[in-house]
Image (cartoon, rainbow, N blue to C red):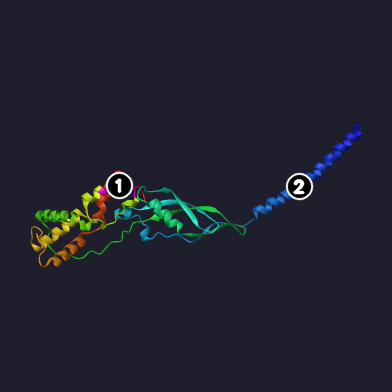
Amino acid sequence: MQLIAGLVLAAFAGLSVDARQEDTPQQIQVAVERVTQPITPPSWQSPPVVNPNDYPIFAGHLGIGAQVLVECDVDTEGAPRCRAVDTSVEGLGFENAAVAVAERGKLNPRRVGDEAVPSSIRLRVPFTPDNTAQTAPDWTGPEPTNANLLAGLVAAQSLARSPALEGQIDWGLHQIEPERARMVQQWITEMYIGRTNAKLMGRGIAMVLAKRGAQVMPADNPPDWAEWVREMDTALASIYTPELNFGPLQQRYCARYGCGTP
C-alpha cells in the first residue's frame, strides 16, 4: 500500500510540475503583449491663446495680471472640459476667463494602440497686463495756479453729476465677487468721472484755464466752446497714463483685498 501511495503522489507531483511549466510561458507572453501597446499622449492640435477680450475688465483697468492653473478632462474627440484649480490672484474673474480660454483649444486625444481613450491634462493660462506706452501730445502753457486747480476740480465734479456719463462705462464689476463689486462701485463713484480720475481731469481743465488766463470755467458755453473742449482733451491726454489714472484705485483695492503675485 505504501508503494502504491508513493507512486500516486509522484504521479500527481509530476502533473503539478508539468502544469506550472506550461502556464508560466503563457502568463509571461500576455504581460509582454500589454506592455508593448504603443501609447501616444494627448497633444495640442489647436492650442488656446489669450486674446485681449479674454482679460477680466476690472483687472485690466487696474493693470493686475495673474497665472491660473487649469485642469482639463479630454474626451476621445480631443475636446477639453476644464476647471481652475489654482490662481495667483483671486476674486477678479481670472478663473472663469482661464477656463474659457482653455476650452477653446482642441487636442489630439490620447491613444493606446489605435484606440482613442479619455485623458486629463494640466496647463497654466497667463494673463499679462498691457504696459504699452502711449505717445502723449505736446502741451504748451503755464503751470496752473492753486486757484486754477481748485476751479478745475469743481468743474470736473460738476461733470461727474452728468447722467450722460453714467452707464457708458463698463468697469467689469459683474466679473468680480458681489461684495467686492459693491465696495468698488462706491470707490468709483467717489474717485472717477466716467473712466477718468476726477483729480486728473480737474488738472487737465486747470491747464486750459491757465493757458487762457481764466480763473473759472465759463457759466455758459462761449462761441468757441468746441476749441475749449479740444484743448481740454489735449491737456488731459498730455498728462494721462494708466498708472496715474487707475493707480489710486488699484492701491485702494489691493490694500483691502490683496492682489497676489502674478
Q: Residue at x 19, y 60 (%)?
A: 236
Q: Residue at x 13, y 61 (%)?
A: 208
Start-end of magenta stretch: 176-185
Marks 2 and 1, the one that precedes in the sequence? 2
Give the amino acid type for the residue marked by disc 1 in the picture: Cys
Q: Secondary structure at mark 2?
A: helix
- 10 Å crowding of disc 2: few (<14), some (14-19), many (20+): few
**Is the residue 173 above or below the residue 134 in the image?**
above
Most common secondary structure along the magenta stretch: helix
**In this rendering, would 32 be left or right of 165?**
right
- 10 Å crowding of disc 1: few (<14), some (14-19), many (20+): few
**In this rendering, would 8 be left or right of 238?**
right
**In this rendering, would 246 be left or right of 19?**
left
Q: Position of residue 31 (x, y in %)?
A: 68, 50
Give the position of the N terminus as an image quadrant. Answer: top right
Give the amino acid type for the residue marked by disc 2 in the picture: Asp
Q: Residue at x 91, y 35 (%)?
A: 4
Can residue 252 be found in the magenta stretch? Answer: no
Q: In which quadrant of the rendered view does residue 204 lie? A: bottom left
Q: Which residue is mark 1?
A: 254
Q: Position of residue 37 (x, y in %)?
A: 64, 56
Q: Which residue is mark 2?
A: 23
Question: In the current view of this chain or complex, which residue is farthest to the top?
Answer: 2
